[in-house]
Image: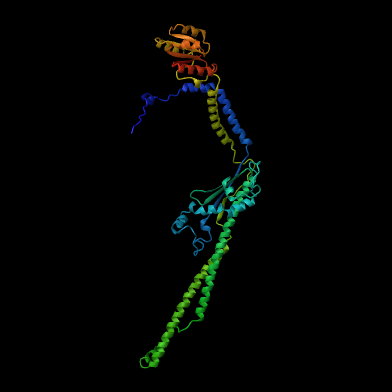
Amino acid sequence: MQQNTVYIPQDELDEELTIDLKKIFFALWSRKFLIAKTFVAVLVLFIVLTFIMPKKYSVESDLYVNKANNSNMMEINPYAIEELGGAGGGMAALMAGGGGALTNELELMQSPLVIDKVIRDNNLVYKKLFGIFPNKKEGEFISTKAFLKKNISFENKKGTNVITIEYKSKDPELAYNVVNSIINNYVELHKQLNSEKSKSDKEVIEREYNKAKQALNHKVNTVSGLPEQAAAATGNLSAMSAFSKSAQQAMANIKGQIVAGQKSRIAVTEEAEKVAALSSKLEWAKMVDEMSDSSKVLVLKEPQKLRDFEYSSPKLLINILLGIVFGFLAALFAVIFAENTDKKLTYSMLGENIIYNLENDFSDLKLFLLANQDKKLSIAVFENIPQNIAEQLQGFKNANLVKADISGEFVQNIKNSDEIVIFATVGKTNSKLYKQIKTMLNEMHKNVAQEVLI
């Protein structure tokens, strides 16, 4: 199989990216008024938006869900076991007292059993799209899913049993009512769940208690046999049984009656203990039923009604910071756009070797001309140069001044030149002509050795 080898010149690998910071500085400095105007305009826009954008009000409340205050917990009712998701994991969650046990509470809080009532309490219905376009669902109550998508948040503070509810709205009254409604309906749901569970427990225990009591009464009414103390009175009969068969038979009957009596007593005792245990459970169940109206939810932070000026967004300080950031980005974009679309020559259009001020840095140009006396140089002039500079340049025999133009004369004047020096003025020289001349020089394989700004 033939292998294709890609050759990359070593010069290209060794080439380093160079950034002319001086050129960037001059480009920015030449656009300082554009930068200032753009930056201030964007900053003012963000500040103005603070006062004209719709205000949003944020109402929040903190709820402490006390897992130990559940009337069906073992601490309150020793005969009921809280469903904590398994023996090991559930007990670990209980001992930790952390947020893992609140997952069910968050689900309950966000369930349709709570949210649907909140929606109806606050008449939250579908409206026109953007307040203009008709909506097929217009006037219908919004769904729980739609309600939970925006403006509402439920957060379990890490490592605690505290849940924070936050709702944002343009109407402070609505924000307060929604949070308050969530709390009330969540508490009512807990009361309902506790009540149903406690009543069910009470019915089961009471039914078993009645059965056990009936069984105890039956055992008591059917007790038979002799008590154990009756054996003490059979001493003479026991002695006679050694000589008389009738006495032996009587003795056997008495022993049978004593055993039957003991069995009856044991059965009655067992039923009595069962009735006593169920009676204790029934008392706990009744107490739990009475406690079912209580809630394990404690409101640590009540929702507050906000005044018109207590809005959460937009914030002036935040908008100022945003204005600074976006103002800087907008100013940078404006500079880049202006540098690339300006009809006059800009700093970004210049090449790498630049003499930024001909009058102040003429010595640099003079040094370049002296160092290249063995080469034929052409100076392409876009703008008029000072008379004193022109006179000094005439002293260099290897350099000739040529008017930069798209013409055959210009081509003939530079045809035999080894390198080209360009004289131009930023903000004055026609950028299109400048680019055309550089394109022509590139196609003629003429190297632009220096670019001098007049």
Would you say 429 lies left or right of 399 here? right
Q: Position of residue 297 (x, y in %)?
A: 56, 55
Q: Position of residue 314 (x, y in %)?
A: 59, 38
Q: Nearer the viewer, residue 145 or 360?
A: 145
Q: How many marks?
A: 0
The quadrant of the rendering that contains the N terminus is: top left
Residue 205 appears in the figure: yes
Would you say 180 lies left or right of 257 here? right
- Tell me if residue 207 comes above or below residue 168 in the rendering: below
Res 294 quadrant in image = bottom right
Q: Nearer the viewer, residue 199 or 427?
A: 427
Q: Nearer the viewer, residue 68 or 363?
A: 363
Residue 294 appears in the figure: no
Q: Position of residue 176 (x, y in %)?
A: 62, 47
Q: Nearer the viewer, residue 86 or 274?
A: 86
Q: Position of residue 77 (x, y in %)?
A: 51, 63
- Among all residues in the image, which is located at the extreme front? 1
Which coloring applies here?
A: rainbow
Would you say 272 lies left or right of 177 here? left
Res 241 quadrant in image = bottom left
- Among all residues in the image, which is located at the extreme left? 1
- Tell me if residue 454 comes above or below residue 317 in the rendering: above
